[in-house]
Amino acid sequence: MYQKYLLEYIKNCGKIAFMSTNTTKSKGSKTSKKTSAAKTSGAVKVYKKIAKKNKALAVIIAAVVILLGLGWFFGGKPIIEIGAEGITLVQTEEPILYHIPEYLRGEYPPQTDYAELNGTGEGNTNEAVKETTKEPSETPASTSSSGKKTTSSKSGTKGSDPKADTGYAANNPLYLGNPTDAYADTKKNTNYLMIKPQYTLSYNTETLCPNWVAWHLDTSYMGSADRMDDFRPDTELPEGWYGVKKADYQYNKYGFDRGHVCPSADRTTTKEDNSMTFLMTNMVPQSPDNNRVIWMHFENYERQLANEGNELYIIAGPYGKGGTSSKGTFDEIPISLKSGETLHMNVPSHTWKVVLGIPNGENDLSRVTKNAIIIAINVPNQMGMGKTGDWEQFITTVDEIEAMTGYDFFELLPDDVEDYLEAQKYEYVK
């Protein structure tokens, strides 16, 4: 009897011990789980704090970048330039912020009295513009005993050189003639011919600007390529010749735009084509109101003509000395070199352009008749002209541009057609 109770007691004790062990294990497991959960919760909190801090940091960085970008854009798009004066911050365009108060007061752009400028009591007339133009660097065109125009100049444009004028295929910018008989000869440094797939130009090392730029325009040159804005020196200039740089225009001091002669928007088939228009050999110092108002509006009109089914032969360039920006009137922009030498980039008094247009087709020379589109403009390189009208106020004749510059345009046309067209004054109808 005693043994029976003892065995039962031992058995019950074993059960209790087993249950106790299991309970301990269960409690330990729960404790472990709680510890693990606590650790996980802590990690999540730390992660959230870090993420919150990173998010705030990202917002701050983004805000700083945006503010810096806006400051750069509205502050004249400055660049860091390393030159003879050391490291300098140079504005490449006129700061927009400078003119906000003036715009609000209606004082910008400053108005120029063209009646006073041209010496007339009326608005602008091209005869008046011609009379107030400074003496040309080229000798004006004259007429030979045979009745054919001849020209003479210091840059080698005397007479007509058939070798310089012929050999160019249709649609080539010089198909109708080489205005100054330019050659790719380094001895002709003031009339140096540069032929590019996008346009052709005559470069002048004394003015550090093109004498003229010529190009052909129809809708095949216009596509969807972005504006590249990669202003840069022309590496195709002969060795030893100075290549003008973007910062040489010193916008914050002189206030002139890097004005395209062949427009960026006329070459948008590919990015490469557009980029080539940003070579500095395709630029002249232009007053902002000339470049961004009159000149741009006329470029738009040229493309309108092309979109209407015409192909255009265009030649344009600078003339004279002395232009006016919001910073004042300047004859030149000095460029200081590390060697101590100072070069002088000419600021023109005018920018001119001549355009000959015919309907799209083949055998262009034979299709140019007295019915062809012919437009010539001569625009003062001044401020304020947007308040006196648009580009049509500066319409003149090709004859007047030739007399002013000493160049001979479209000389491969039959004489009767050339003489007739060059005497015409375009009638613009809005």
Image: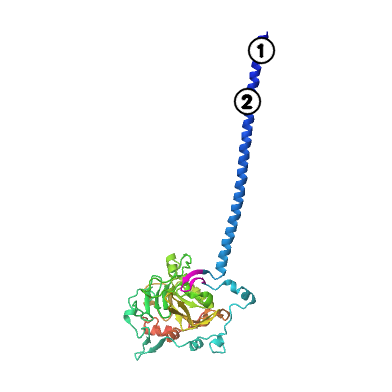
Q: In this orientation, which residue lies closer to the viewer: 426 or 268?
A: 268
**Image quadrant for the N terminus?**
top right
Q: Position of residue 109 (x, y in %)?
A: 58, 78
Give the side of residue 428 with respect to residue 211, left or right: right
Quarter location, residue 212: bottom left
Label 2–label 1 contact, CB within 8 A: no
| Residue stretch rendered in magenta on the structure | 79-91
Give the side of residue 33 with respect to residue 142, left or right: right
| Spatial CA span between label 2 and label 1 | 24 Å
Name the residue tied to disc 2.
22
Name the residue tied to disc 1.
6
In the displayed structure, 238 sits above or below 31; it is: below
Disc 1 residue type (three-letter): Leu
Mark sitting on residue 393: none
Visible in this render: residue 176? no
**Image quadrant for the C terminus?**
bottom right
Q: Position of residue 300 (x, y in %)?
A: 50, 73
Q: Position of residue 363 (x, y in %)?
A: 36, 74
**Tag 1 secondary structure:** helix
In the displayed structure, 30 sits above or below 335; it is: above
Q: Earlier in the sequence, mark 2 or mark 1?
A: 1
The structure residue drawn at horizontal position 60% and vertical position 47%, both measured from the top left corner, is: 47
Decide whether the magenta segment is chiefly helix, strand or loop. Answer: strand
Disc 2 residue type (three-letter): Asn
